[in-house]
Amino acid sequence: MRIGFVMSMGRIATVSPRKREMARAFIFDWGLVFYGLLLVWHFGSLWRGEAAKGALPLLEISVFSTLLVILATWYGATPGRKLLGLSQQVQPRWYRLLWIFFSLMIALLTLVQGWRATQVDVAALLNRDGFDGVLRIGSALLSPQLSIFDKAIRALIETIYIALMATLLAVPVAFVVGFFGSQNLMTVTRWGSFVYSVVRFFLNLTRSIEPIIWAIIFSVWVGIGPFAGMLALALHSVASLGKLYSEQIESIDQGPLEAITATGAHSLQVVWYGVVPQVFLPFLSFTIYRWDINVRMATVIGLVGGGGIGTMLMQYQGLGRWNEVGTIIILIAIAVWAMDFASAKLRAAIS
């Protein structure tokens, strides 16, 4: 059984690049058609006056979308194949107009559905009572309460340390993961391609979940406080930096690698002497930029129990003490501006 699993993984890893691109084009076209048909069904239900609360006909739409994409792919160029450069075939005018009409219809229905989903209300925006309420809160925010200044400063320092520790913990992990997630280094062997696919899947999955969600998870795991916030930022930083690092490795000059390989060096020596010198400065720039991002995110995750000044902001906001909230916002703005200025100078100095 184990031998069969290994052989199947090898066959998956050795799929030709063109077949992979064709599969991606098919998935893109299928998603486009599926989304378009789903919008058409939704607005058709509204037009007929039916309550769109029943079960969606996902199976029927999926099957119909698959048949349409197969038919369109058999006939000629599709948006997915055009986008990936897999077809240069000139199609009849009616065929191209059909895709253009379908795309414009999707764009229009998406705009209409977005307007409905967000419940846009211009009258509420121009309401005088609401505008007066904003003025009252704004005047309170611009009249900070200095009695909490010392407490807010300590919370702000805690926030900066949360971001710092998260970045320092993420960098070595992301450094290693970046190499395993680089296509040019890993896809030369079957197992390398398999590891590359697993690492990229992990990076994409972890990065797609916002730090505030990770903060909630870690708050339940280790308890509310700065440790939970630091872990949430560290995990998200590993995914973000790992992606940036791997993309930088994929863009390196292959000449030094070939020269070092020709001397008989093993894989680790090729990476250390051929890759690391080319990516060191970009890696450092990405790391500084990520710390800048983490300082801002540390404030947000504090709203869900991640510690730092965000927790303090949530407490005073819940009590409606807008003068204290104004003090915290001013301190956050000053800290973010200072971090942005410092990180910009550091990135300019090393670039």
Image (cartoon, rainbow, N blue to C red):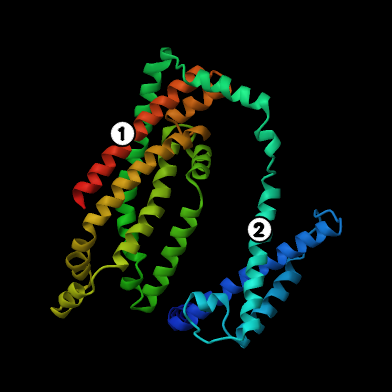
Q: Mark 2: which amino acid?
A: Thr
Residue positioned 50% across, 37% down in the render: 219
Give the x, y percent position of residue 31. 62, 69
Q: In which quarter of the image is residue 96?
A: bottom right
Above or below, 113 against 78 in this view is: above
Above or below, 32 against 209 in this view is: below
Residue positioned 34% across, 55% down in the render: 174
Residue 296 can be seen, yes or no: yes
Mark 2 vs mark 1, CA separation in Å: 40 Å
Which residue corresponds to mark 2? 110
Viewer-nearest residue: 78 or 167 = 78
Q: Is residue 158 left or right of residue 30?
A: left
Q: Is residue 21 left or right of residue 109?
A: left
Which callout, 2 or 1, points at the residue further toward the start of the chain? 2
Residue 15 can be seen, yes or no: no
Q: Do the residues labelled 2 and 1 touch (CB within 8 Å)?
A: no
As drawn, the label of residue 231 is: none
Which residue corresponds to mark 1? 338
Give the x, y percent position of residue 339. 31, 36
Q: In this view, does 110 lie to the left or right of 153?
A: right
Q: Mark 1: which amino acid?
A: Ala
Give the x, y percent position of residue 258. 20, 77
